[in-house]
Structure formats: C-alpha cells, structure tokens
Image (spheres, grey):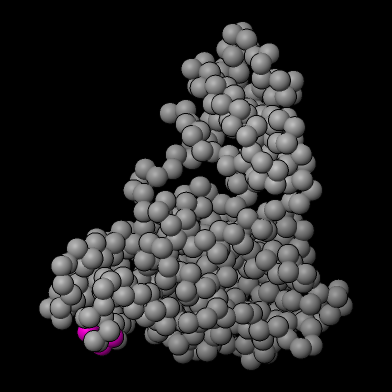
Amino acid sequence: MFEDLSQKLEIVFKKLRGQGKITEANIGESLREVRRVLLDADVNYKVVRQFIEDVQKKAVGTEVLHSLTPGQLIVKILHDELVRLMGTTKADIAIAPMPPTVIMVAGLQGSGKTTFCAKLAHYLKRKGHFPLLVAADIYRPAAMDQLEMLGRQLQIPVLVDRGKGAVEIAEGSVEAARRSARDVVIIDTAGRMHIDEAMMQEVASIKEKVKPNEILFVVDAMTGQDAVNTAKAFHDRLDFDGVVLTKLDGDTRGGAALSIRSVVNTPIKFIGTGEKPDALEVFHPDRMASRILGMGDIVTLVEKAQEQFDEQKAKKLEEKLRKSQFTFEDFLDQLHEIRKMGSLQQIMSMIPGLNKLPANGAVDEKALGRVEAIIQSMTAEERRRPQIINGTRRRRIAMGSGTSVQDVNRVLKQFGEMQKMMKTFSKGKLPRMFRGMQLPA
C-alpha cells in the first residue's frame, strides 16, 4: 500500500535530515521535491498546490528553523497536514435510531462495489448487526448471482427479485428487512462504465424513494485522478455521505486517497485491502498518514491480532510452552492465525522499520507456503514426534509437498532449534515464532 509514494518521500526526508543547517532555501527545495512526488502519485494538482502552501507556512516558522531536529519537525508537519487533508478523524456509519438502517452503495462498474457490499455486511455482522443484502443491479448479468454467492458464503440473506425494476426492488427491501427482523439493509445499485445519465437518474430515484441513512460511493484507488473526477460527478447528483477506496492492496499510487476527501469534502470511511470478506478496514486518516510517511501502523496491526485472538487456544499454547510440548501441529496453527490477519506483506507494512524493506523483495509468501506444505505432508504422529522422521519419511514428505529433501531437512533443523529456544521462555511469554526461521528458497 503506497510503497512507491512512501519510498520517494523517504528519499526527500533523508536529504533534508542530512542538511547541516535548515534554511528557507533548502526547505523550499525539499517541498518542491515533495510536490513532484505527489504529482507523480496522481494527486489532484490543486490539492497539491494548497497542501504545499500550508506545509510551507508552518515549515518556515521560527520553531523549525531554530530547532535541533528540524528534519523531524518537518516530517511531523507533513504528517499533520496529511491527516488534515484526509479528514482528521475516522467517520462512522450512520446507524438509524429506528431500524432498519438503510445503506445505499453506488459506483462505477469494476470498482469492486458488489464485493464491498458483501464485505460491509460481514463487517456489520461481526459488530452484532443482522444485515440484509439487496441485489438492485438488474443490468449486469452476473451481479445478482455474484451477490447471492457471496451471501451464501457469509451466511447472510440476499434479497433477489429478477422480475422487478431496481427502484421497486430497493423500495421493497426495507419492508422485507422489517418482516425478517434485519436491522441493516445494504443496497447494491447498478454500476456503470462511465457517467451514464439514465443510470444516474435511477440511483437518484432510489435515493428519493428509499431515503437511505447512508450513501457510500465506491471507487477503485488504482484509477488515481479519474477516481476524483468520477466522485465529483456522483457527489453532485447523490450528495453521498462517504467514500470507499477499494484495491489498495494493488499497485496504487495514492492519488485518490490524498485527493478525494478535499475535492468532494466527504470523508473516506472504508478501504479495501484484498479479496477476502474480512479484507476491509475502517479508514483512519492519522494511521494512513503514518503508513504513507513510512512510520508503520502498529495500532491497526494490534487490532487485527485482537480480532483473530482465541483466548482458549492461547492458554493451551502457553501451557504447552511451559511443558516444552510445542509441536509442528501447534506451529501450523500459528501459521494459520497469522494468515488470517492478511498477507505477510501487509502485516510487515504496518511495522516501523520492516515497512521500509524493498517492495519487491521484503517477503516471499511462496516460501511460507512451502513450509506449510511440508508440515501438512507429515502424518499426525510425525508432527507430534518429528524425531521419528528418518530418511525414507523425509523423501516421502518432500515428494508430497513438492519440495526437496534439503528443504525438509532445513525445516526440521530449524524447528528443533526453535523448540530449544522455547524452553527458555518464562511463564506468560508467547513465542516469537519466526525469529531466525529461514524459509526454503
């Protein structure tokens, strides 16, 4: 997420911190570099101009010019201005005082709108709500089928009526939610390849008839400046309440995230970071600014860990560690727990220091998969008692996992070292699973 933007800004900061003395001249030079980096990231040029002006006013103040750490102060000013640019505080979903809460979702075709509807329903379900998904996209042949499939996977009901128009479906969904005791209605409206007057009129009619508590506009973050122009056109017609940025796990330059809040004066509420149902994050401007400036995002990482935390499993694991009974089965469980939090690349991007590793070589996800395959190719007895794995068994495990005997030997050796290390852990300390764990190439 924003690796290219972060790395280019880090180069600028290094130059600034390397200056023997900070002057208005070298501050100006650094900000010109920041301007160029932001424009390269496809940030709206008007937004960039105002942003640089605001930073410059604060950066040339007496406090910075006479500070012992002027480079750090300027980074802090940039951080504060980025936060202000993206909205200062997180914006929550507006929940109706009398259910059901009606959420209307709009956006261009291909933006990930239908997938977001399912993710939002999953998110609200975990918060204790009872959502109803509504398939009101009657034009794209697979849209209703896609929403039905996602609903089945998440065990969330989907209202589908192929014989009615979109406005009629949306109107009927509110009463259907009341009858089935559903407290949230999420309406997936028709996407469009471009701004289409007929379809724009349709979403305007749905808004008028249903009077949603919340209108969310979904936009593909990889479209950069085009995303901002589209958002403005939709906002003029719908006056939506929040923006959702999807595909932030892709090769996005960051322009949409940094521009859209300022241009439409509407908060970003969610970001999509993958295809899985739980790959949805509430947007926190301060945390996003920290990620962009290479400071990591420990708070979000801790929250992700807490969501996946199983207290009973943790107690059992702690007991095994105290008794030196940690096995390959326990290690496999920990691999799965970490995988639930997202890709290792995403996890490392939130950790200060690790997030500055080269984007193309920081983590080899396939290598972790090979370790998992090796463990899964073992029998239950071999996982519990790896000391019984002889040469014949090693060859069988290597063949079953699609790896080499050398890879299997390496995993066994390092697991043995890990077991020895864990014997030294004191009561109450959880293991650092992957310290020194060299994955097979």
Q: Is 254 situated above or below 198?
A: above
Can you give x and y, in whole percent of width and height, for residue 80 in the image?
Answer: 39, 79
Q: Is 58 part of what is drawn in magenta?
A: yes
Horizontal side of 12 relative to 2 (left or right) equals: left
The N terminus lies in quadrant? bottom left
The span picked out in magenta is 56-60
Can you give x and y, in whole percent of width and height, for residue 198 in the image?
Answer: 51, 82
Question: Secondary structure of the magenta portion, mostly?
Answer: helix
Q: Residue at x 12, y 78 (%)?
A: 25
Q: Which quadrant would residue 336 be assigned to in this image?
A: top right
Q: Nearer the viewer, residue 165 or 114?
A: 114
Q: Nearer the viewer, residue 104 or 271?
A: 271
Q: Residue at x 40, y 54 (%)?
A: 353
Q: Nearer the viewer, residue 398 or 293?
A: 293
Q: Residue at x 79, y 88 (%)?
A: 98
Residue 131 appears anywhere in the view: yes
The extreme left residue here reads 25
The C terminus lies in quadrant? top left
The extreme top residue here reads 392
